[in-house]
Image (cartoon, helix red, strand yellow):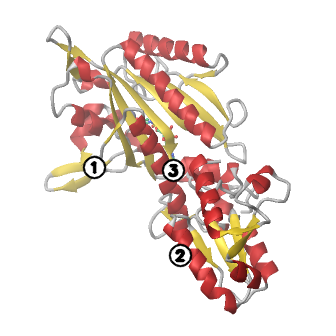
Amino acid sequence: MPEANENDHKKLGKELDLFTFSDTVGKGLPLFTSKGATIRRELERLVVDEEIKRGYSHVYTPDIAKLDLYKKSGHYPHYKDSMYAPIAIDDEEFMLRPMTCPHHFELYLSKPHSYKELPIRIAEMAKLYRYEQSGELMGLQRVRSMCLSDAHIICASEEQAVEEAGYALDLIEYLSNIFGLKLGVDYRYRLSLGDRANTEKYYKNDAAWEKGEALLRGLLKKRVGEFEEAKDEAAFYGPKIDIQMKNVNGKEDTAFTVQYDFCMPDKFDLTYIGEDGQPHRAFVIHRSSIGTLERTMAFLIEKYAGAFPLWLAPVQVRILPIGEGHFAYATEVMDKLKTANIRVELDISDETLGKKIRGAKTEKIPYALVIGDKEVTESKVTVESRDPEGKPSASNGAGAGKSISIEEFVDKVKKEIQDKK
Ligand code: TSB
Ligand code: ZN
């Protein structure tokens, strides 16, 4: 079937060699190439560093757990249809996890907590497995194995929970801004509500649903004014604020989410010791910051049409020696860039310089460095940018079109990477 759009992430993913799928591995289970893994790693580093700055504790918990855990949480039966079948081992049944929440709650329960410690923000880049319908699978946008930038925030009061939901939205907006995503243009807010009549899908507690929905509505009204309300789009344990994005073909999905949970604290008996020395019921916020790395990559590949900003580009610089006589100096330049942690490649093909430059642009590599006699004699490099002359990134970039010293080029590139332009 022909792709509907030339910026479709599935098409660009193949052309730019970012990820692939194999029928032998299984439907909806992506394999990231080295280039795709580089983008994924940069996203992960960005979010983990930022979350630690904002008071999150990053943890690791297993991808699999006993079926009993998901019975306790209510994922089984409420979320059963989206889970892989149980695995029998030594007379016990285990499940690949579709969500991280119960793992984080068990971690919280491993010791007592005082009100002074709260809120506790337990975060993880969590590998999750969901049995999505095969007809719904769509490149990286909807997969069966994914990595969620997940967190569960254990709070001492409703007020604290709403405040934390607000901080989670601050983080989401901060990250969206780095990606150049604009509210109203690239994304919009949706208040995702439950359905009191559907007790099979949603945990039954009408009063708690009313309250949770009113709290999130109030928060959104204060922050954005305009937003959509959607019935029957909540999590089984509570209402959500979803940040919705559309792909290049117009298909909308939730990119990021902040959820209010009034159900799991009871199921897991999540408590803290209050000022009065007595145990009190905790409140929980579930949230993702940059969503799943898979879905977010799908949106970003399309948003940038494959031309990633320098900090995300799998190859940041390609060195183009004009002839064999320039290989030694080109290798010296490459080593200096590598030492500075710049992702660099050397083009030693027999092609003409024009073709090498066009090749670097087609592959959307931000910078190419031309090296000929003049550059070797003067100990310089001539910088070619993938952006057309006159575009701000070309004129403000790392000396595009100019001959500069390696040191000057390295300094400029490092600054541009750091600024995440
Ligand atoms: C935020 N327990 C919460 C968590 O703490 C949770 O898992 N919420 S979720 O079910 O809404 O999933 C979180 C996010 O994962 C979604 O908002 C969406 O951005 C992403 N996601 C869900 N399913 C898929 C999928 N099949 N492929 C890619 N990303 C997905
Ligand atoms: Zn959760």
Cα distance between the residues tagged 3 and 1 = 22 Å
Q: Where in the figure is residue 57, as x and y percent of width and height? A: 32, 37
Which residue is located at x 61 percent, y 41 percent?
A: 178
Which residue is located at x 48 percent, y 56 percent?
A: 41
Which residue has dot 3 on it? 43
Query: Which of label 2 and label 1 is nearer to you?
Result: 2
Label located before the other in sequence (3 or 2) = 3
Which residue has dot 1 on it? 62
Q: In which quarter of the image is residue 149?
A: top left
Disc 3: CA contacts within 10 A as few (<14), some (14-19) or many (>=20):
some
Q: Where in the figure is residue 203, as x and y percent of width and height? A: 37, 23
Label 2 residue SS: helix
Which residue is located at x 41 percent, y 36 percent?
A: 53
Q: Is residue 148 left or right of residue 265?
A: right
Query: Is ligand 1 closer than 8 angstroms to the Cβ of mark 3?
Result: no
Q: Which residue lies furthest to the front in this view?
A: 378
Q: Is residue 71 left or right of residue 28?
A: left
Label located before the other in sequence (2 or 1) = 1
Which residue is located at x 24 percent, y 49 percent?
A: 94
Q: Which amino acid, by three-letter code, is at mark 1?
A: Pro
Residue nearer the viewer, 372 or 366: 372
